[in-house]
């Protein structure tokens, strides 16, 4: 009897479990017996009665609640029990324009969908803890935010909308909510102005947070306003804190005699700096002299920033927070206050300056016969800009012509060896603007790298490599002091093959079967594309194919430069990792105790992150200036080259000013076009016309949106011109 009873109750228990699981998976819904049957795939009448009985039983036992006649829902108390028993997942909020979000987590192979109503107070970019709902078959996983672990940002840029009784802040970026601002916390901002708002409170039952204006940026569309917006948006401060500036101003520029006696003196050796014409922070200098044995001595002298910026001071903490200087079109956001970056540490001519130096004895084949690293004092004889040095090298006359020519000859030999070992030789031109007194661009041009630039670059590369080798070799010899390296991983093979396939369609060839063939064929392609319309596009694609270089204590070498050891030693005025390298190198040379590896790695990660943000901010400022430059040229026609193809439009770069805009597919009215992704082109369905990456086209400027930093072009034919 008991056996038969057990056999009969077992399937009933299994059915109850299955039915309850359906309500767990659909915990927001009320379901009747027909809907449950459908989800179980059973429709016969006898089974329906069984489900009716099961729903009644689960309701009696408290697992379900009957919302109204025949409609059931999971008991909220049971749902809470399930949540407590479930492992939570932590991830980053990626918000969509609709307000829905996806949680990106290393703990889940798939992104987790979260509806707007289940985000709680989470904003785009926040780190959150979520409850993962039981997964439904063939459906993307879903969940709800339980806790905001940390905010990505608490300060936001946007526009202020002021009414009689209150103000609302609308963010430029999609953060998922507006911010309520009391009228007494507007800081003088006017309706429609761009401001920075800080969230001050967000009540649990409130739809939107409260905030206050902490910075008035100005009127939308104005150059200063938009550039300031870019700076703040990428987490760089507009000002130095008052206490940091005070600390910097207390530092004396007078060098005590006791300090000079500790250092190797280069003040009587020919020394010069070579920088852009508008530079104010000169953090590297080159010295040169001929030795009695016929060899040359070249000193790479770097501003001794760590002599002035002591560890854990306010200055040091602020420098670490910024991690890098940011070079925008109309200004520089320095890592260090001006008193240090442009005066005390800057290697200005005819002034005694403290340096950390790497000094090399080289024979006429640029082979290193001796090297020395240590603290020095220099006095630069001349401040050159790149154009001046280029003219001296070409004409072979001018100030220090013999020394510059000798250093350049050695640099060329170092470069040749580096390239022969597999180093990539990117010759990227910089987009530069000529600005009027109101910061409006009146001209756009490309600044090409010349021998004068490469002269400095090759000796900086040499110093960086040799400093890294000094630390890296010691580590290999069991002296396990940690160090900061600049590393670059090998490219993704699939991306490399894709690049080779694309450039092959344009008549160029990249061999992907070995590291040596990759570098040789890539360099040949980069050389062959110089001066051609497609140069900028191909160089950009090649760079995107490469892995991103970054800072770390774990040395894997630098693939792009073909160096086994590499670091950044030569720019401590504008890069915090160089400050770290100076401190570590001094410890190595003095056999001082090692730094904590975990702490160093944390600073490396932060510096890498801020470097990427600085590069993005620079690109944004260039994009804004390009849009501003074309804003008074609506209707004008230009020659362009197709630089990108997507399913919604083609990107075109204007050849003579390198401004890039989009032609929407819907605006090409001679046919209906679709994307042929495999062949990097769009194709007309009826006329079979094609427009592919690298094609030359004529465009007309249709619109220039300053706030969105977007250019709209329309395609025209030769007759339309």
Image: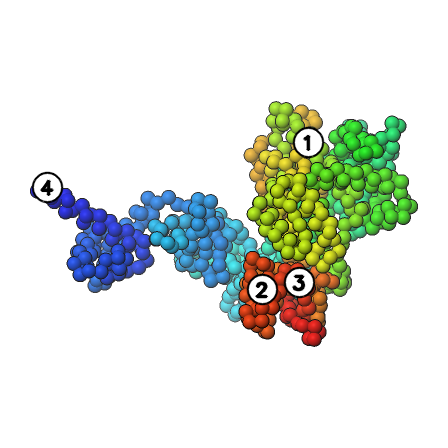
Q: Which mark is residue 2?
A: 4
In this view, 623 is above or below 456: below
Foreground disc of the pair 4, 3: 3
Q: CA distance from mark 1 to mark 2?
A: 50 Å
Residue 712 placement: quadrant: bottom right
Nearer to the camera, 196 or 184:
196
Foreground disc of the pair 3, 1: 3
In this view, 548 is above or below 301: below
Q: Are marks 4 and 3 in contact (CB under 8 Å)?
A: no
Q: Are marks 2 and 3 in contact (CB under 8 Å)?
A: no
Please name the residue that numbered disc 3 is placed on: 695
Residue at (66, 60) in percent of width and height: 694
Crowd band around label 4 with a 10 angstrom C-alpha radius: few (<14), some (14–19), many (20+): few
Nearer to the camera, 373 or 321:
373
Nearer to the camera, 88 or 142:
142
Lower position in the chain sequence, tag 3 or tag 1:
1
The residue furthest right is: 397
Please name the residue that numbered disc 1 is placed on: 469
Q: CA distance from mark 3 to mark 1?
A: 46 Å
Please name the residue that numbered disc 2 is placed on: 682
Residue 304 x, y percent position in the rendering: 74, 37
């Amino acid at each position: 009897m008991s056996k038969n009873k057990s056999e009969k109750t077992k399937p009933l228990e299994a059915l109850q479990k299955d039915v309850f699981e359906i309500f767990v998976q659909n915990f927001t819904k009320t379901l009747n017996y027909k809907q449950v049957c459908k989800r179980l795939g059973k429709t016969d009448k006898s089974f329906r009665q069984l489900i009716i009985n099961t729903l009644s039983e689960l309701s009696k036992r408290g697992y379900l609640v009957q919302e109204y006649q025949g409609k059931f829902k999971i008991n909220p108390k049971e749902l809470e029990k399930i949540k407590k028993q479930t492992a939570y997942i932590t991830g980053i909020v990626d918000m969509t324009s609709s307000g829905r979000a996806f949680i990106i987590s290393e703990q889940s192979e798939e992104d987790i969908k979260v509806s707007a109503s289940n985000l709680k107070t989470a904003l785009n970019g926040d780190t959150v803890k979520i409850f993962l709902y039981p997964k439904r078959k063939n459906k993307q996983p879903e969940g709800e935010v339980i806790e905001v672990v940390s905010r990505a940002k608490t300060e936001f840029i946007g526009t202020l909308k002021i009414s009689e009784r209150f103000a609302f802040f609308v963010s430029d970026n999609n953060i998922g909510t507006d911010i309520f601002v009391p009228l007494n916390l507007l800081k003088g901002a006017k309706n429609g102005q761009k401001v920075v708002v800080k969230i001050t409170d967000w009540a649990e039952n409130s739809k939107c947070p409260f905030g206050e204006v902490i910075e008035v940026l100005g009127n939308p569309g104005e150059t200063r306003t938009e550039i300031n917006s870019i700076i703040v948006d990428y987490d760089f401060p507009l000002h130095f804190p008052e206490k940091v500036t005070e600390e910097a101003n207390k530092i004396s520029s007078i060098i005590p005699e006791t300090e000079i006696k500790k250092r190797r003196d280069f003040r009587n050796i020919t020394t010069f700096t070579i920088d852009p014409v508008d530079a104010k922070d000169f953090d590297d200098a080159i010295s040169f002299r001929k030795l009695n044995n016929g060899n040359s001595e070249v000193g790479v002298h770097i501003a001794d920033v760590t002599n002035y910026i002591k560890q854990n001071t306010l200055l040091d903490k602020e420098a670490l927070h910024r991690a890098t200087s940011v070079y925008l079109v109309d200004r520089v956001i320095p890592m260090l206050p001006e008193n240090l970056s442009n005066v005390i540490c800057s290697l200005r001519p005819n002034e005694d300056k403290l340096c950390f130096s790497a000094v090399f004895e080289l024979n006429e084949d640029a082979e290193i016969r001796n090297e020395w690293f240590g603290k020095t004092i220099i006095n630069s004889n001349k401040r050159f800009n790149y154009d001046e040095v280029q003219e001296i090298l070409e004409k072979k006359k001018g100030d220090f012509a013999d020394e510059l020519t000798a250093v350049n000859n050695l640099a060329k030999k170092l470069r040749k060896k580096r390239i022969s070992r597999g180093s990539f030789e990117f010759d990227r031109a910089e987009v530069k603007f000529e600005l009027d007194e109101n910061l409006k661009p009146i001209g756009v041009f490309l600044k090409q790298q010349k021998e004068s630039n490469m002269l400095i670059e090759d000796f900086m590369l040499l110093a960086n490599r040799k400093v890294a080798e000094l630390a890296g070799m010691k580590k290999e010899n069991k002296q396990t002091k940690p160090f900061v390296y600049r590393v670059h991983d090998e490219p993704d093979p699939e991306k490399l093959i894709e690049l080779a396939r694309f450039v092959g369609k344009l008549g160029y060839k990249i061999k992907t079967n070995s590291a040596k063939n990759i570098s040789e064929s890539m360099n040949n392609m980069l050389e062959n594309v110089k001066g051609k319309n497609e140069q900028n596009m191909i160089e950009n694609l090649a760079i995107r194919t490469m892995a991103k270089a970054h800072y770390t204590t774990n040395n894997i070498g630098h693939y792009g430069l073909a160096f086994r050891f590499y670091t950044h030693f030569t720019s401590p005025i504008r890069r915090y990792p160089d400050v770290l390298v100076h401190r570590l190198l001094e410890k190595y040379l003095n056999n001082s105790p090692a730094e904590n590896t975990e702490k160093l790695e944390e600073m490396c990660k932060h510096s890498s992150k801020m470097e990427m943000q600085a590069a993005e901010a620079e690109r944004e400022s260039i994009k804004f200036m390009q849009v501003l430059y074309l804003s008074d040229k609506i209707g004008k026609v230009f020659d362009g080259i197709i630089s990108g193809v997507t399913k919604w439009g083609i990107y075109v770069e204007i050849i003579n000013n390198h401004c890039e805009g989009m032609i929407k597919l819907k605006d090409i009215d001679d046919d209906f076009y679709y994307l042929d992704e495999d062949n990097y082109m769009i194709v007309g369905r009826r006329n079979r016309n094609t427009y592919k990456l690298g094609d030359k086209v004529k465009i007309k400027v249709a619109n220039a949106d300053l706030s969105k930093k977007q250019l709209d072009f329309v395609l025209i034919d030769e007759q339309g011109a």
